[in-house]
Structures are given as structure tokens and as C-alpha cells.
Image (tube, rainbow, N blue to C red):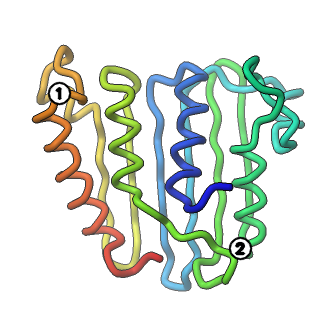
């Protein structure tokens, strides 16, 4: 069982990486009324119409190491249980976009969790490729974090898991996430 929304994002972003995405975009928008919309978009290989039609079933997976895939079905269930919606679009050769919303005031809405830690984990476990774009917006503010900008400043040969780079990434992500959601998100 996934305990928070950031862990859902970690799992779903891993699907994007496995699909060969060179860019994974994560957008979170918190409205004044407490509705949270999460979008994860990638430019990976996409899904066939047949897979797209059955991917919300826990028994649909492309993995050969196990017979079930729970990330997408669990995200759908959690969004709908929390008074929200779930939508998935995919086109072979173009990528996939997953969008869900949930009412953060609903008792069944999972907490956000450690979003900056999740983003940092994605960057450190994929130190050279792909790139990640995070965009966030709330009543408190809005902002973004784009690893392409970081790579341009560092040079393409310095990995994110180099200790001084990792420390800077953690500090920068914590600051950006706090400036957007600090005190306004569960």
C-alpha cells in the first residue's frame, strides 16, 4: 500500500523512465478550494491502444518480473476515493500523460509526503538521464525546477549523484517546494 502521494509519483515516474522518456514532467496544482491536481507527462514510448484500455487493471503489466502492475490502478483508486478524477492518455511513439485530482479535505486523501525527497530520489538514481521538470502552483505561490537548467550550468559530464551536487539539489528542491506549498498542503 502506498502511504503518500509523493510515493505514487515516484512509482509512476519510474514507469516513464522504463518507457525510455528523455523528459518527465510532474505538475501539482492546489486550488483555493483544496482540489489538488497531479499530472505526470513523459515523452517515452507510449502505450498501444490495447494496453491503454486495460492498464487500470492490476493484472495488466508490461513487466516480465511479475504478473501485476499496481501503480496506475492504485493511483486511480486513491484519486476517486478522495473525491477526484483520473485520466490517462497515451500514444505510441509520443508518450503518456496521467492526470488525477483529489480533494485534500477528503478523509480518504493521502498526504502529499516528502515531495522534495521524492524528486531528489528520482534525480539521484538517474544521475545523467532523463531530465525532470517539476512545476507547482498553490494559493501561496508557484514555481518550477528544471534539471535541464541544472545540467546546462554544471556541464553534461557531472552527474547529479556527485555529493556536492546532491547536497545542492536537496537544498534547492526543499526551498522551491516550501515556497510553493509550505503550510498549505497536507
> Percent from the top left, x then y, of residue 88?
73, 45
Q: How many marks?
A: 2
Nearest to N terminus: mark 1 or mark 2: 2
SS for dot 2: loop
* Residue that appears at 40% across and 73% down: 138
The residue that mark 2 highlights is 82
Which class describes the residues within 10 Å of circle 1: few (<14), some (14-19), or many (20+)? few
* Residue that appears at 71% across and 33% down: 90
Which class describes the residues within 10 Å of circle 2: few (<14), some (14-19), or many (20+)? some
Residue 58, quarter of picture: top right
* Residue that appears at 72% across and 63% down: 78
- In the rendered structure, find residue 182 and report the number of the disc placed on it: none
Depicted 167 relative to depicted 140: above or below? above
The residue that mark 1 highlights is 162
Residue 176, quarter of picture: bottom left
* Residue that appears at 31% across and 25% down: 127
Left or right: 31 as drawn, with respect to 80: left
Q: CA distance from mark 1 to mark 2?
A: 39 Å
Left or right: 84 as drawn, with respect to 127: right
Quadrant of the snapshot with the N terminus: bottom right
> Percent from the top left, x then y, of residue 104?
58, 78
> Percent from the top left, x then y, of residue 132?
39, 36
Left or right: 15 as drawn, with respect to 184: right
Mark in the foreground, 1 or 2: 1
Find out whether the residues at labels 1 and 2 contact each other: C-beta distance under 8 Å.
no
Amino acid at each position: 500500500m502506498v502511504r503518500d502521494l509523493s510515493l505514487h509519483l515516484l512509482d509512476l515516474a519510474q514507469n516513464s523512465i522504463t518507457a525510455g522518456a528523455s523528459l518527465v514532467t510532474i505538475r501539482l496544482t492546489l486550488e483555493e478550494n483544496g482540489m489538488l491536481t497531479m499530472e505526470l507527462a513523459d515523452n517515452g514510448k507510449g502505450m498501444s491502444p490495447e494496453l491503454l484500455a486495460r492498464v487500470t487493471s492490476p493484472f495488466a503489466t508490461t513487466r516480465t518480473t511479475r504478473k501485476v502492475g499496481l501503480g496506475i490502478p492504485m493511483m486511480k483508486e486513491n484519486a476517486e476515493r478522495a473525491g477526484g478524477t483520473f485520466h490517462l492518455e497515451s500514444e505510441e511513439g509520443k508518450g503518456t500523460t496521467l492526470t488525477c485530482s483529489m480533494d485534500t479535505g477528503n478523509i480518504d486523501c493521502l498526504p502529499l509526503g516528502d515531495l522534495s525527497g521524492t524528486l531528489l530520489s528520482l534525480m539521484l538514481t538517474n544521475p545523467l538521464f532523463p531530465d525532470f521538470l517539476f512545476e507547482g502552483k498553490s494559493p501561496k505561490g508557484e514555481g518550477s525546477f528544471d534539471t535541464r537548467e541544472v545540467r546546462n550550468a554544471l556541464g553534461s559530464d557531472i552527474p547529479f549523484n556527485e555529493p556536492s551536487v546532491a547536497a545542492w539539489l536537496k537544498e534547492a528542491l526543499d526551498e522551491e517546494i516550501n515556497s510553493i506549498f509550505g503550510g498549505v498542503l497536507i
